[in-house]
Amino acid sequence: MTEGLHESTLIEDEAVYNEVVPAGESWIKKIKKGQTIRIVDMEGNQAVDTLFFDAEDTEEHYDAQATIRLQGNVYLGTGSKLYSVSGLHLATIVADTCGRHDTLGGACAAESNSVRYPLSCRHMHNCRDSFLKAVLDNDFDLEKRDLAANINFFMNVPIDPEGGSVFSDGISAPGKYVELKAERDILCIVSNCPQLNNPCNAYNPTPARMLIWD
């Protein structure tokens, strides 16, 4: 991972795809090899939970353990390479104006909501449900068992000296973005996190923008 912030040279008006994902909604799309995808935190400190799959073999999904081990860093930033379970190079972060992104926090789910927050939160919409809705509503030969550990773009989960972690205040801001180049044909699935119980987003989920360039 390269230290520091790195802005993109791509021009928004030249994107071949530009769509806003409302707060709490899911998004799924195939990204062709060589294309670049930008994820924009439109209003600041909004976690964008993201999964990547090899489009030709969806058993080859993004693997947090392989990615952390091969790059020797638990955070993602410019220069980070995302790897699959067998070590396939899926994508590379080529620009980043946030600074770092979480690989450890996972996606909120009914079960985790009931552990982290009052039991009454169990029924609330969550990222696991958003991922599941995305795969069931689209014909990409995916099902519940295929939902592995995800990346939390724009989320801040620092590791303390004892190896523990905590969900901290975000370090992102309105308009911050991360850009990834597809190293092979990949499938990208996003849950624009609906979490209402975490103060890092001021208890206010906000929209994200997705752009793609050839």
Image: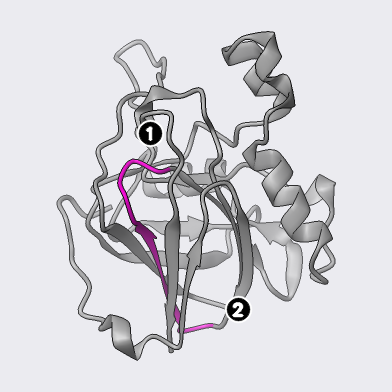
Q: In the drawing, what numbered circle is on residue 201?
A: 1
Q: Earlier in the sequence, mark 2 or mark 1?
A: 2
Q: Is residue 91 magenta?
A: no
52 in relation to 100, above or below = below
Q: Could you tell whether 167 is left or right of 6 in the image? A: right
Name the residue type under label 1: Asn
Q: Could you tell whether 105 is left or right of 108 in the image? A: left
Q: Could you tell whether 26 is left or right of 74 in the image? A: right
Q: Could you tell whether 206 is left or right of 31 in the image? A: left
Q: Which residue is mark 2?
A: 185
Q: Is residue 40 magenta?
A: yes
Image spot of residue 39 (x, y percent): 40, 62
Image spot of residue 100 (x, y percent): 29, 45
User: Range of the magenta residues?
Assistant: 33-46
Q: Secondary structure at mark 1?
A: helix
For image coordinates 51% across by 49% down, the residue present is 23
Image spot of residue 139 (x, y percent): 83, 71
Q: Secondary structure at mark 2?
A: loop
